[in-house]
Image: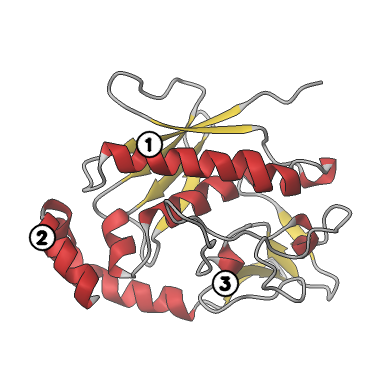
Amino acid sequence: MTQPMTSVVIVNNGTFVKDAEIASAASAIQGLVQGDFARIWGADAIAAANLPGFVRAGSPENPPSADEWVLGLYVDPDRPGALGYHAKTAPGLPWMKIFPSLAEDEGTDWSVEACHEILEALVDPELSRWARLPDGRTIAVEVCDPVQADVLPRSGPALCDFVTPSYFGLGAGGDGLDLLGLLESPGEVRPGGYNQLLEDGNISIVGAAEGVRRQKRKGSRVWLRKYRNENVVCRGVRRLLRI
């Protein structure tokens, strides 16, 4: 039986990102989803990814349909320390949010965050998957968190690295532990990455120093992000100076 196509629509909600940038990023993410990601996460039934996938840019003329997943670009962060996250709508569909201005504050391209949330939603749309590692630890099946600071070397919109089923002890192996081949053991966390660890019914974060730093920066700079979201010159100067 053929798996139905999962369609993800990227929708801009008043951020500085231009329509052409969104269309370019959607095309790049679709290429990754239908290429390396499908090859690694779609071949094994135990991986259970929601593939094949299709990613497109939304517009007033072509808005999301009732059964499409939505990734929204927003001006103001609504979750401390998060450049983006995925949740669920009332009907039960995955719903993803990213914050391009906050991503720029951290020196990250918004397309990396978009790619991150889409890949993770495809593997765990219910936010309910856990995996037991060979060393006995149990971690959340989040395919980009452990390597979230690592970007694929490619031209065009920046995209994120991701871990393979073997990282979680799923599937037959053979593709290493992440696409870039940076990880050496299951459950390992790269600099800037993290895992959610489940132990005795409690969830803790491993490798969250970067997330704590982002959370400390959030509140006092909301007004500045709003201005930067409106002002192209300010964004250009800040990128040069990294302020």
- Asked whether residue 243 appears in the rendered view, the answer is no
Image quadrant assignment for residue 147: bottom right
- What x and y, as percent, mark residue 217? 28, 75
* Image quarter in which the C terminus is found: bottom left
Determine which residue is flagged by label 3: 194
Q: Nearer the viewer, residue 212 or 175?
A: 175
Determine which residue is flagged by label 1: 23
- What x and y, as percent, mark residue 87? 49, 45
* Image quarter in which the N terminus is found: top right
Farthest residue to the right: give it: 172
In the figure, 40 relative to 108: above or below? above
Q: Identify the amino acid type marked 3.
A: Tyr
Determine which residue is flagged by label 2: 233
Mark earlier in primary sequence (1, 2):
1
Per the model, the C-alpha gap separating discs 3 and 1 is 30 Å
Q: Is residue 56 left or right of residue 173?
A: left
> Under tag 1, what secondary structure?
helix
- Asked whether residue 192 appears in the rendered view, the answer is yes
Residue at 13% over, 55% down: 232
Q: Is residue 173 left or right of residue 40?
A: right
